[in-house]
Image: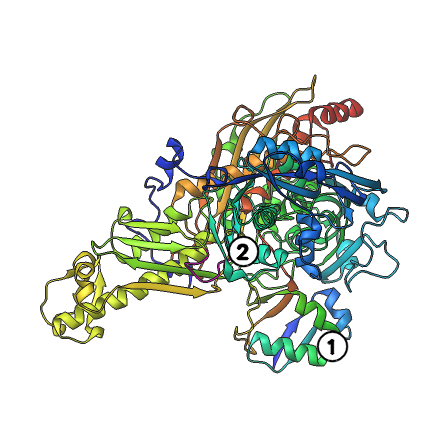
Amino acid sequence: MIKVHLWSGLRRLAGGAEAVTVQAATVGQMFDAMIAAHPGLEPVIKAGVSVVIDGEVTAGGRNLAVKPENEIYLIQRVKGG
Amino acid sequence: MPKDELKAGFRLVGTRPNRPDGLDKVTGRARYGADIVAANMLHAAVVRSPYAHARIKKIDASRALALEGVKAVVTRADFPTGLTGEDWNLQENTIAGDTALYDGHAVAAVAATSALVAQDAARLIEVEYEVLPHVTDVDAAMAPDAPVIRAGNADHSVPEGMHPNVVRYIDFGHGDIEAGFAAADLVREGTYKTEATHQGYIEPHACLGQLGADGRGEMWVCTQGHWYIRRMCAAVLGIEAANLRVTPSEIGGGFGGKTTIFMEPLALALSRKAGGRPVKLVMSRAEVLRATGPTASASMDVKIGMKKDGTITAGQVNFRMQGGAFFGMSPIAEALPCAFACYDIPNLMHEGYEVLANRPKAAAYRAPGSPMAAFAVESLLDEMCRELSLDPLQVRLKNAAKEGTKSSYGPTYNRIGLVETLEATMAHPNLSAPLGPNQGRGVAAGFWFNHGGETSVSLQIGEDGTVGVSVGTPDIGGSRASIALMVAETLGIEYEAVRVNVVETGSLGVNEPTHGSRATFASGKAAVEAAESAIKQMCARAAAEWGIDPEAVEWVDGAARPAGENAGKFPPLTIGEIGAKMGGTGGPISGHHESVPGGVGASFGVHVVDVEVDPETGKSTVLRYLVVQDAGRAIHPAYVEGQYQGGAAQGIGWALNEEYIYGADGRLQNPMFLDYRIPVASDLPMIDTVIVEVPNPGHPYGVRGVGETGIAPPLAAVANAVAAASGARLRTLPLSPPKVLAAIKAGQ
């Protein structure tokens, strides 16, 4: 199981929890499991979020591996100049 | 990889060879967007709305079309319908549909046999408008009585009951904010405002587009990202992306403003309507300022709690940002996490609103959102340090984020270099330079994430042993030189033997633009991987020639060599010898690498500025300026210093003079450099730089990316220096002489 930390705005769509726990081995599976458990998250995740894995901001490629020991945060999609 | 395990003492990395584009640029040989010409080419001009908000009732192009030399006119009716989301935003911004949403919004375009005829024809296109109420100020746009710009744009996040112009709401934090303030000895709050500013790139947008009736076309364009141009133009025009080949020109600055489209589809639509003749479209400076994407204007509340010893116990922000008349354009999602990113604070709360306004569609601008956030937070921190008689750098060091700190936006930091950056700042002689009357010193810190992004690179070994590298990230800040240095270092050959080319969209897989401070990090990392791949192939060719196992061959100093005594005794085969024979030993040797590279490393900077404020006029003169920033590793230190200096120069302009000034009629009042005042050489001292190197373990040479962090601290650093010099604490930028003078007089 992996633990995914949510920003406050997402918590309202996930029953108020600060983090959700899902069974997943990749970012794609993680998103799918989160949406299955909390359908309200779907439009936000599909609009694009940044996934921070062990402190590194990623674009959230679906094939990225995630493991139970990873620290995972979702943050709003970050753009650069 | 721990810092100390990264290889040091490089042969080429860290040296300062001549830049490969230098001769072309100083001799005028480099080809920028407006330099591209084609046979049978037409010239385009654009008709723009003179109103901030107006319904378009009728467009009559008959008089323009009757003018000799006019070959085509396009309006929104020439574009496909049914687009949604950001594709619709891009199309709507390219050319207005029913409503002009800001002063300068394109409503029609014309192509003719000369630029003058096109401009004359544009004046003959008659547009009938119904003027609508408008709003340009971010706080006014949220007020209950504000005109609605586009209803139904808000996403799920906006609380019920808010004005329809509020389209996005973000909140996050950690700890117990009230307990944090209760634990403080001093709690202060303030409201800070910044106006929209433009990236101010010297080269205006320019392109040459050709599109046939078969939907196949080409574009030559000044851009930071030609795959983005391809995808966006294809979406707006309803053509297939692979049928549009996009070639980037040299680029005269971008700073984020050239990561998207503004007028490029117009050239293609005109070309299609003119029978496939190429169409050239070059913006004037006024068009650039009115109709391309500046950054957002911001209104920001900050509250901080601090103990007497300087420990920050709590921080709270509420930011409002407008990004024009389109959803998703303000940098609110970036500004909020940057606000307290430099510090280890146990109790934090962030809230932010994105707001629509009758302004142009904002674009990215160097560390989007971070400079505004730093202006608000670093200014209030400075005020509190002065009130508690604390050294502002010691307070920043006391609270500095480090490896293992839970960041303000949640995740735990990996290896970062803020502490080393602060320590290098405190050791710099500028900190002990004496200050005279009416002079003051200001400091501020800043942060940027940096970015990886989709990347594709190929590398080809030449028959003479030289190496070509094809990258898809336009070279804005020296990436060709930096990539050449890394490839030469990896291959063990000379820098001059490597030529890096920025190639068109048909030559590589998709590349994200040069944005997010990523080009040297991402294309560099991919180029090193491609070089390693080529090395493996060259070792295999040598092994085949020697009749030994490829695993028994190693690559050292630009040549394949037997790996030890047991491998056999063979003279080294150099890259030139292998290249000369490759046609007969298996064919061309090349390496390539495609990925979304991981291992991105964040970077921090600290700026120190001394200013003198003339008490008679309110004019601020920058006497001394110091940038200290963690580069991870400076591949070509001269370019890194240039990035630091450039960020500081832009930030100084933003702090002291630059602003979008809208009149009561909603029209931009200063759409030219005479009135929109970016700093010139005589406004600035030599900007001192210190490159701190805390290598990023996620990059083979330790690169973090350096392009953006440098613009985060200057707004606050300059405002803090002006406050120290004059006693006038201004919380609204820019600190123009009349504003400073009024504040001085008000304080007397």
Choose mark 1 or mark 2, whichever is in front.
2
Task: Measuring from the top left, give residue B372's x and y in whole percent.
Answer: 67, 44
Q: Residue at x 53, y 54 (%)?
A: B212
Relative placement, left or right, of B405 versus B576 is right
The answer to whether residue B635 shows anywhere in this view is no
Which numbered tag is attached to residue B300? none
Task: Measuring from the top left, give residue B239's x and y in whole percent.
Answer: 58, 60
Residue denoted by label 2: B230
For the N terminus of chain B, the quadrant is bottom left
Task: Measuring from the top left, give residue B718's x and y in whole percent.
Answer: 62, 34
Residue B506 forms part of the magenta stretch:
yes
Relative placement, left or right, of B562 versus B212 is left
Q: Chain of mark 2?
A: B
Q: Residue at x 48, y 34 (%)?
A: B688
Q: Against B722, is B223 above or below?
A: below
Would you call the spot at circle 1 few (<14 residues within 10 Å), some (14-19), or many (20 or more)? few
Q: Against B379, is B243 above or below?
A: below
Proximity of marks 1 and 2: CB atoms separated by less than 8 Å:
no
Q: Residue at x 65, y 45 (%)?
A: B374
- The total of numbered circles placed on residues is 2
Residue at far top of view: B616
Residue B419 forms part of the magenta stretch:
no
Label 1 sits on what residue type? Pro
Residue denoted by label 1: A39
Q: Quadrant of residue B125?
A: top right
Tag 1 secondary structure = helix
> What segment is highlighted magenta in the picture?
B505-512
User: For the residues tagged 1 and 2, is the chain the same?
Assistant: no
Task: Measuring from the top left, give residue B31's x and y in whole percent.
Answer: 43, 39
The answer to whether residue B393 shows anywhere in this view is yes
- Spatial separation of the CA atoms under disc 1 and disc 2: 34 Å
